[in-house]
Image (cartoon, rainbow, N blue to C red):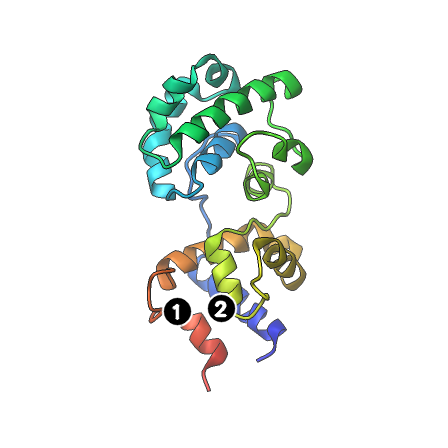
Amino acid sequence: MTKKQRAELVQIELEKLYPTTPIPLDHTDPYTLMVAVALSAQTTDKKVNQVTPDLFAVAGTPQRMAKLEEFEIKELIKEIGLSNTKAKNLKRMAELLLERHNGIVPQTYEELEALPGVGHKTASVVMSQGFGFPAFPVDTHIHRLMTQWKLTSGKNVVETERDAKSLFPEEVWNKLHLQIIFYGREYSPARGKGEKDFITKMMFEK
């Protein structure tokens, strides 16, 4: 099976499994999405969704977040890993949104990635799921599965993103990256043995 055929197989099978792709992180607008994604680093989406209702109840806008002290933000997110750093980032992120963008989340990668706690992956999620721009955010599930499916060299997430964008049509990027994440969690978890990973078996069975 060629690389192109494997990519087509991925698209077909994932569309059967996940015809709809709800965003895993609860949010109400691009700002709360950006905060949730920033919080999700080295933390499960489930844990983030448990914490953000209380956080957004008091700091669901940059204006309200900027008014809080770091220790107040940390108290609200203390169950999440790296809470010290994330609290500092959330406060400064909110301040810079007010200083530079009138409290509105910008719609360019350069401006997003200039915000504390916002790396390329977070910016890509905001651009794709928050604003609808074609993007292919790569997380650990996508990086691992793209390598497993021999659709990328797997050296780093930058190369994986580049290869994904070259293999899959732009119009499916925003949906497909979520489908791969869902598949990884359900059928091919990092710590599992891959018994349920039927896509890999379909690709490489003799």
Return the disc, 1 or 2, that comes first in the chain's sequence. 2
Circle 1 packing at 10 Å, graded few (<14), some (14-19), many (20+), is some
Badge 2 amino acid: Gln
Badge 1 amino acid: Asp
**Image spot of residue 174 (x, y percent):** 57, 49
Residue 19 appearing in the image:
no
Q: Is residue 170 above or below residue 8?
A: above
- The residue located at (38%, 19%) in the rendering is 71
**Image spot of residue 132 (x, y percent):** 61, 41
Q: Which mark, by number, is residue 76?
A: none
Asked whether disc 1 touches disc 2, contact meaning CB atoms under 8 Å apart, the reply is yes
- The residue located at (45%, 72%) in the rendering is 200
C-alpha gap between disc 1 and disc 2:
11 Å
Of badges 1 and 2, nearer the viewer stands 2
Depth check: give the residue in front, 33 or 142: 142
Q: Is residue 106 left or right of residue 55?
A: right
- The residue located at (52%, 66%) in the rendering is 147
Question: Judging from the image, what secondary structure is the residue with disc 2 in?
Answer: helix
Q: Is residue 124 above or below residue 183?
A: above
Look at mark 1 in the image and give the residue it sits on: 197
Look at mark 2 in the image and give the residue it sits on: 148
When asked about the image quadrant of residue 194, the answer is: bottom left
Question: Judging from the image, what secondary structure is the residue with disc 1 in?
Answer: loop
Q: Is residue 100 above or below residue 140?
A: above
